[in-house]
Amino acid sequence: MADELEELWKKLSFTNEEDANIVLGSGSTKAAKDRGKNCLVMKVLSSRSIMLDSLRKNLRMIWKLNKGVQISVLENEMFMVEFGDEKDKKKVLEMSPWSFEKQLVLLQKFKGEQAPKEIQLARSPFWVQIHNLPLKSRTGETGKAIGATLGEVLDVDVAESGVQWGTCLRVKVSIDVTKPLCRGKRVTIEDDKSRWVLFKYERLPNFCYKCGLLNHDLKDCPENLGPAKMQDTQNFQYGLWLRGDIISR
């Protein structure tokens, strides 16, 4: 509807009265800004329609909030989430990513300068496990360097010494979900020969084994594979092996 109106406006010739500019001061936005401090903008990364009642019920259950939450439709599967407690909002953000019906839920802090149709939710935090690193590279510096090639580094799971032994090195990264999942990288350490390090993603929702995108799964892939090819998962470039078990910090 908004796109149709925009196209209509382009064709219109405005009268002097219509073209007169209305100047709105800070007083006109204060109430919305104050309420927005406890709000998040949310989108479910799905090609299917979202049932609002089901979404509300599911998120209230998994978020386990101290106080209530209101979820309102903004536009085109985009929602406003208003928390009754700022601590609840902070917890929900820190524990991201979340999913609804196995589809990724994107969350963004309230800013207010954009109309809903102008808001682009395209990033989500993930704990990424980096496998096949030599022991000498299980450091915070390594995590930051590799994580920075995936997106904005939010955290690295290392001890106070800056080193973390274990099955892998973990880094929390805000990744661009409009791109295919990155499966790994070639890394050269101290001028040694390069090696392939494998990435696994914790709490990874549905994604397409054909193209690696998070906005649909295999059966909804626009490439329209057909039933026979959908069963031949061994020839796909992506798979279950990208899912990492959740590791406690």
Image: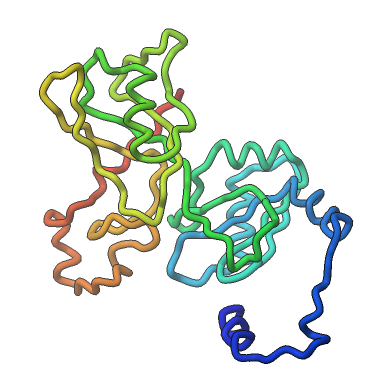
> Does 87 sit left or right of 234 as displayed?
right
Nearest the eye: 4 or 70: 4
Nearest the eye: 146 or 236: 146
Q: Residue drawn 54% across and 68% down?
A: 50
Q: Position of residue 55 (x, y in %)?
A: 59, 61
Q: Position of residue 192 (x, y in %)?
A: 13, 19
Q: Residue drawn 41% across and 12% down?
A: 162
> Does 34 sit left or right of 100 as displayed?
right
| Image quadrant in which you'd find residue 46 | bottom left
> Does 133 sit left or right of 110 as displayed?
left
Q: Position of residue 51 (x, y in %)?
A: 57, 69
Q: Position of residue 164 (x, y in %)?
A: 36, 15
Q: Answer above or below: position of 162 versus 19.
A: above
Q: Residue drawn 47% across and 49% down?
A: 123
| Image quadrant in which you'd find residue 166 | top left
Q: Answer above or below: position of 133 versus 135.
A: below
Q: Answer above or below: position of 71 versus 225.
A: above
